[in-house]
Image: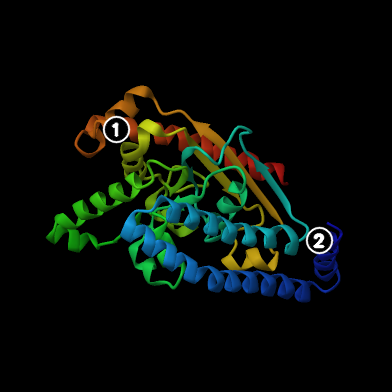
Amino acid sequence: MRSIKKIDSLYEKLHDKLPSVGKAASFLTGAGVLTANSMAVGLPIWTLGAAKVLTGSKLADDALVEITKYWINSNNAVIDHALPHKDWRINLPEDLSEDKQYLLVSNHQSWVDTSIVQYISQDRLPLTRFFTKFNLIYIPVIGQAFYFLDFPMIKRFSPKAMAKNSELKNKNLIEAKRACRQLKNKPFALLNYLEGTRFTAEKHDKQGSPYQHLLKPRAGGLSLAINALGEQLDSILDVTIVYPDGTPDYDDLWKGNIRRLGVDVTRLKIPDELFAAIMDGGYDRDEATKKMMFDWLENIWQQKDARITKMLSEFA
């Protein structure tokens, strides 16, 4: 404990007395840990992943999850000890569990968002997975980890390509449902950025968003996940992230530039009628179900927009 306090104090002194050196020290520490971990876990992930795919071994799957948790927790330790002077205000329900099954919905502003969700999840939520692009599978270690850990990986086709071949859209839906169902018998937190893309002022203006801080929510991915997993879900959690000092780039996190951060997590209650309609497959074929879904999300997004305004004002 004493050695950890000394490390914390060293980074604080560097950031206070030699800010540029302090930022460089924090960044090099983060980059070093991320690189070392990627190299260390690469072979075990490929070996266990191959064993899981070939044999369906639960033991291999459980070991994959534990290795990935170690990987994430090591990154979180850098945040705790190498990034000083953090005013991070995090509010979560007290009865969350690593042994349950959750859907997470969140606003999306930066590549930092996912690291923040992983940070707040440690010792509170199961391993967080999220919908991601299939072509990320070609990124060494990380891409294969996504696949072996049953991240729903979606192939993106252009509207023009889907107009020519409607089977492309159906293929994506089938694959996404298959990936979701792979999670059925294990703890998970499945993250969905409902805006579908990162918030920017340009995107906000282009789509004429009625919200001050948010883009319009999309319902397809969440409806798909509810349909595939809904009967056994413990909760749907709404994650709200604010950066009072402006939207950060990813390297800002590891340089210690994100001094102020707010995260608020609340439970969502889906109306029984809407839940039953989605479970019956209504979202894909019934305009009334789609309207119910969009009305529900619109109400959630209005509350979220007001919550962001309040959270930002509390930092003033």
Q: Residues within 10 Å of mark 2 (few under 14, many from 20)?
A: few
Q: Are marks 1 and 2 in contact (CB under 8 Å)?
A: no
Q: Quadrant of the N terminus?
A: bottom right
* Residue 174, x across and y down, in percent: 23, 50
Q: Residue at x 39, y 67 (%)?
A: 136
**Residue at point 48%, 57% (across, down):** 64
Q: Amino acid at mark 2?
A: Ile
Q: CA distance from mark 1 to mark 2?
A: 50 Å
| Disc 2, SS | helix
x 66%, y 56%: residue:
245
Please determine whether, in this image, residue 94 is positioned above or below residue 167: above
Residue 55, compared with residue 238, is above or below; it is below
Which class describes the residues within 10 Å of circle 1: few (<14), some (14-19), or many (20+)?
Answer: many
What amino acid type is highlighted by mark number 1? Ile
Depth order, front residue of 295/39: 39
Q: Which mark is residue 278?
A: 1
Q: Nearer the viewer, mark 1 or mark 2?
A: 2
Residue that lies at the very extreme toward the left in this rendered image: 164
Q: Earlier in the sequence, mark 1 or mark 2?
A: 2
Residue 199 visible in the current orientation: no
Residue 129 placement, left or right of 28 = left
The tally of labels here is: 2
The spot of residue 169 in percent (x, y) is 21, 54
Q: Is there any visible trace of residue 19 in the rendered image? A: yes
Disc ID at residue 4: 2
Q: Quadrant of residue 73?
A: bottom right
Give the quadrant of residue 66: bottom right
